[in-house]
Image: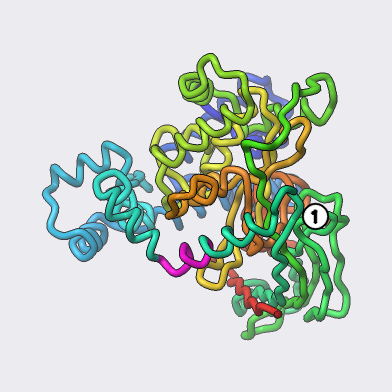
Amino acid sequence: MKIIRDSLSLFIILLFGCRTASDSYQVLEDLQENLDFGNISTVIQTVDSLKKVSGENKNILHIADSLSQIAERINLDFSITESQVNTKIEKLIGSVSSKGRSEWEKNGWLEWKLIDGKKKYFNRSVSNLVLIKKFHEQKAERLKEIGNEPAMIFRLKHTEQAIKASGNHNDPVEPVKMKITYTITVNPDAVPEGEKIRCWIPWPKEGIPRQCGVELLSTSSPEYLIAPDTSIHSTIYMEEPAKKGIPTIFQISYNYISKAQHFNMSEIKILQYKKDIYEYKKYTSEQLPHICFTDNVKRIADSLTQGDDNPASIVRKIYFWFKESIPWTGALEYSTIPNIPEYVIKNMRGDCGEQVFLFISMLRYKGIPVRWQSGWEMTPDDQNLHDWSEVYYEGTGWVPVDVMYDLQKSDNETLKDYFLSGIDAYRLIVNNGVEGPLHPQKKYLRSEPYDFQRGEVEWKGGNLYFDKWDYNMKIEYIK
C-alpha cells in the first residue's frame, strides 16, 4: 500500500478541488510515484511551472515549495556516483569485486537510488557500510574500540558517579552548568537584499527536573520571542533583513544546568496502568507517520515479548534487541522517508532518531506509555544532535531510556546497562515530543518536520534548507 504524504494530498485538493476525488488522487499518485522513482527533475520542473502560474495564491506557493523541497532534499542526499563510491570503498575497505558490492546493495548495506534514471549513492553510504560491517563481522573488535574511546571512558566514570550519588532515591544528581553560544549563519545572497529572514534557534526547555537554571545572556537581535514552555519544541525566534553579499547571523548565548538521573530497575515500583486516563491513551497511541503499529512492528514486538506482561521486562527485551540487532548509521533526512520504523526494519540499521521512532512504536503497541525527548548530547568528547525517550511506569513515573547508547564496558550489570533506565547530565533538552508547531508558526515545510535540533530558517519566498545556512554550538563548562 502506497504511503501518501499529507502535503501532496493538500496540494491536490487545492489545485483540483473542482475535479472528482478519484481524479485528484490519480494525480496525487502520479506525483508520489515520480518522487518514489527518483524523477527529481520532473517534480522540480512541474513545481516551478506551478509557481509561475499560481500568482499570489499563497496556498499554492506553500505546497509547491514543499514538493520542491522534498525533491531537492532527495537529490542532495543521493549525489555520489558509482565511480566515486568505488574510490571511497577502495580507500576505506580495500579492493572489492562487483559481486561483493552487489551483495552489499542487495542487503541494504550500501544505499543507492535511481535519480533521474542514473544510479546515485547516499552521501554517507560508504562510511555507513564500514559501520555495518564492523557491527556484524567484527563485533569483538568494535566493542573493544568503543570501550577505549575517550567519550565512552568519560561517560563510564560519570555514570558511575551518578549511580553513587543517587543512593536510594531517583532524584536528578551530578549537576553540570554550561554556557552555550549558538549561531546560525545564513549564506550571502540566499535571500534577496532587504527581505526579512525568519529564524528559530533551539532553546533549553524549562520546567523539567533534570534541566534548570536557564539564563539568557545575549541575543544578536534586541527583539526576540521565546516559545511558551508548554510548546513541544522549545525555540527562540528572531528576524533580520538580508544584506547583499554578506551572511546574515543569528546568535544567542545562555547558561543552564543539566543533571543526571538513574533508576534501579530492580527496586522501582511497577503498578497496573490506569488505562482509562488521557495521558495513558496519548502515550500508547500511534502518531503517524513515524510512530505506527505496522504489521512488521507488531510482529517483531510480539516475537520478542511473547507471554510477558511485565512492563519493565518488555522494555528490557526490546532494548536489548536493539543492542544486538540494530547498528548506528548516518541517516537520510527524515523528511524524505515515508515511514521511519519500516525503513529501520527493512535495512536493520538507523541513527538515534530512527531507532527511537521504532522503539517508541514497539512499546506503545505493547501498551507501555513512552514519549520522545531530544536535543543535544553535550559531553566534552561527543557533542552532537541526539534523540532518546522516556518510559512511564505506574507507581514510579517517567524513566529516561537511551536506546542508542552502547552498553558500557563494565562487569557491574547496573553500570553496564545504565541507559536502560538512566541518563547522563550532559544533555540539552529541546523537545518533549515530535511534529509540534513552532512559535510563531512557520509558513513553509520545515527542514526538520518532526524533530527540532539544528534550527529553522525561512523567508517569504520559501524555506531555507540546510544547504543555505550553517549552525554552530560552542559549549563552555562552568565549575
| 476 w.r.t. 144: above or below | below
Residue 325 placement (x, y as % from top left): 39, 37
Q: Residue at x 76, y 30 (%)?
A: 394
Q: Please say whether residue 119 is visible from this viewpoint.
A: no
Residue 254 placement (x, y as % from top left): 77, 75
Residue 329 placement (x, y as % from top left): 42, 51
- In the picture, the quarter occupied by the C terminus is bottom right
- Callout 1 secondary element: loop
Q: Which residue is mark 1?
A: 209
Is 96 in front, or is 213?
213
Q: Please say whether residue 98 is visible from this viewpoint.
A: yes
Residue 365 placement (x, y as % from top left): 62, 24
Could you tell whether 413 is left or right of 245 in the image? left
Q: Residue at x 43, y 50 (%)?
A: 411
Mark 1 Cα within 10 Å, few/some/many (few <14, many 20+)? few
Could you tell whether 104 is left or right of 263 in the image? left
Could you tell whether 29 is left or right of 438 in the image? left
Q: Residue at x 77, y 60 (%)?
A: 211
| 53 w.r.t. 217: above or below | above
Q: Residue at x 50, y 30 (%)?
A: 317
| 358 w.r.t. 446: above or below | above
Coloured how? Answer: rainbow
Q: Which residues fall within the magenta stretch?
A: 149-155
Q: Does 153 appear in magenta?
A: yes
Q: Amino acid at mark 1?
A: Pro
